[in-house]
Structure formats: structure tokens, C-alpha cells
Amino acid sequence: MNTKHTIGPWSYNLLNNCICDANGEEIIYGGRAGDLCITYPDARLIAAAPDQHDLIVEMYGWLRVNAGQLQLPQEMRSRMACFADDCKRIMAKATGEQP
């Protein structure tokens, strides 16, 4: 899967009312103070999005390679397959692609 998002880590700059990328460049700008209409907890969630995406990509890769090879009860293997499907769906949603 090709990365189509701005690479993190992202941060919320309260002074400038914007979300910045790892280089400090503004990627979401709110204009005047308050125009961004984002609460601080939401800003932290947005700032964590690249890390969350990377983790989901890593989990999906691990599940695809290892889930079928582990000596686990069928119920656990089925659950791991569901996790892999969920990872694939979330990655597609994040990138605008079809799952």
C-alpha cells in the first residue's frame, strides 16, 4: 500500500491554531483563533492518526503472514482473520481505496 497521507508525527499548534506535520509545516490551518473548530482532545486524536495508520498496516501484514501458520484453535484463527479484514477495511477508508 502506498502512503498517500502526510507523514507524521503531527502536532497541534495552539498559538497558530493549526495542525502541523513533522517539519512544523501547517497541514490544517484554522485561520483566526477558533476557526479550526477543533477541541484539544480531537487535535490529539488527529495528531496520532499517522501512528495509528502505521500500526494498522503493520498489524495487517503480521496477520496475513502469521495467522494461518499458528497452531491455535479454529475460533482464534477465525478471529484473527476478522482482525485482518478490519485492518484492510480501515486502511482502505484512510486512503480512499476499495477494500
Image (cartoon, rainbow, N blue to C red):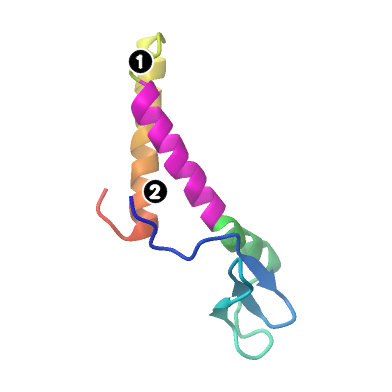
| In the image, farthest residue toward the front | 23
Above or below residue 93? Residue 33 is below
The residue depicted at 67 percent of the width and 81 percent of the height is: 17
Q: Which amino acid does label 2 sit on?
A: Ile
Secondary structure mainly formed by the magenta segment: helix
Coordinates of residue 16 in the picture (x, y in percent): 69, 83
How many residues crowd around disc 2 within 10 Å: few (fewer than 14), some, or many (20 or more)?
some
Above or below residue 47? Residue 74 is above
| In the displayed structure image, the side of residue 93 where residue 59 appears, left or right | right
User: Is label 1 in a helix, a strand or a loop?
Assistant: loop
Splitting the image into 4 quarters, where does residue 8 fall? bottom right
How many residues crowd around disc 1 within 10 Å: few (fewer than 14), some, or many (20 or more)?
few
Question: Does the magenta-highlighted stretch encompass residue 70?
Answer: no
For label 1, the residue is: 69
Count the marks: how many?
2
61 or 17, which lies in front? 61
Closer to the chain start, of discs 1 and 2, is 1
| In the displayed structure image, the side of residue 85 where residue 32 appears, left or right | right
Q: What is the C-alpha distance between the residues marked 1 and 2? A: 24 Å
Splitting the image into 4 quarters, where does residue 38 fall? bottom right
Coordinates of residue 27 in the picture (x, y in percent): 54, 76
User: Is label 2 in a helix, a strand or a loop?
Assistant: helix
The residue depicted at 34 percent of the width and 43 percent of the height is: 88
Mark number for residue 90? 2
The residue depicted at 70 percent of the width and 67 percent of the height is: 40
The residue depicted at 40 percent of the width and 9 percent of the height is: 73
| In the displayed structure image, the side of residue 18 where residue 88 appears, left or right | left
Residue extent of the magenta highlight: 50-67
Mark number for residue 89? none
Coordinates of residue 74 in the picture (x, y in percent): 35, 12
Q: What residue type is labelled 1?
A: Gln
59 or 82, which lies in front? 59
